[in-house]
Amino acid sequence: MRWSTTLSIAACAAMVSAASVARGALDVLQPWQLTAMRTGSPPYRPNSTIPAGLGFTIADPNQLNAGPGHRGTVVFPPSTANCTAQWLEGESPYGRARNCTEVLYGHWAFEVVETSTKYGTWPLQNFDILITRVYNVTALGNLYTKVYEGRAHFEVGATLGGLCGASGICSFQLKNETSPVLIRQSRTACLGDCP
């Protein structure tokens, strides 16, 4: 009897341990992948209505637990979004939260962060991108939310390549050897399954 009780406890401990490993695999984060970064500006002309701009693609390869649902655990699937910003001469691209293209279960947003005044903003050549990924889903009447943030630096000559033409048109894009840019994200808020 004692032997079977010890064996049962050992078996239960092994099952709990295996379940923890399986669940933990979903909670280990791979970095986000930023690709296709581009920034540019038209030739400078006073009172021009042609904007400067930037754009990029951001991908989250992770599948995250949200919480219990009708058929087991609800998960937030991997997602990809395209993000863009435009501004006119004299306007600042900095400090504004902008939404990216729509995705399932929440949204992506970003902000251009000033890091140096060396180059100015026409075109944008030295800056950070602060990216926010908000996951939302309702299951069994409960709202599950996770919010993650990550930040990356971009600079002409380091991560961006390109040129300005004689006409004043400038275009810079992510260098092939620096793509994708891996962005380490950290959780800033959570409601639901929050290990």
Image (cartoon, rainbow, N blue to C red):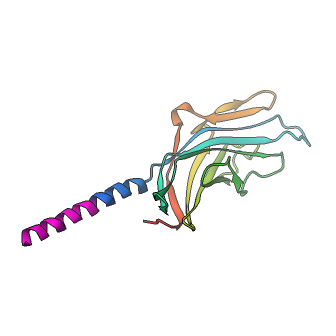
Residue 162 drawn in magenta: no
Spot occupied by residue 46 in the image (x, y as percentages of width and height) = 91, 41
Q: Specify the farthest residue to the right.
A: 47
| Residue at the top extreme, as displayed | 166
18 vs 59, left or right, is left
Q: Which residues are magenta?
A: 1-17
Quarter in which the N terminus is drawn: bottom left
Asked if residue 120 is positioned above or below residue 147 in the image, the reply reads above
Residue drawn where x is 49% and y is 46% of the image = 61
Q: Quadrant of residue 94?
A: bottom right
Q: Nearer the viewer, residue 22 or 119?
A: 22
What residue is rendered at 85% in x and 39% in y? 50
Give left or right: position of 66 versus 124.
Answer: left
Q: Dominant secondary structure of the magenta stretch?
A: helix
Residue placed most toward the observer, 176 or 105: 105
Q: Residue furthest bottom?
A: 2
Residue occupying the point 28% across, 63% down: 16
In-image side of 97 versus 63 (left or right): right
Residue at position x 28%, y 57% in the image: 18
Where residue 188 sits, quadrant-wise, is: bottom right
Q: Position of residue 123 (x, y in %)?
A: 74, 41
Query: In the image, is residue 4 part of the stretch drawn in magenta?
Result: yes
Residue 127 in the image: state x and y as whole percent: 65, 48
Counting the numbered discs, the total is: 0
Quadrant of the image containing the C terminus = bottom left
Q: Can residue 123 be seen by looking at this rendering?
A: no
Q: Is residue 22 left or right of residue 102?
A: left
Vertical side of 163 occupied by 50: above or below: below
Residue 8 in sight in this render: yes
Q: Nearer the viewer, residue 45 or 33?
A: 33
Residue 129's spot in the image, x, y percent? 62, 50
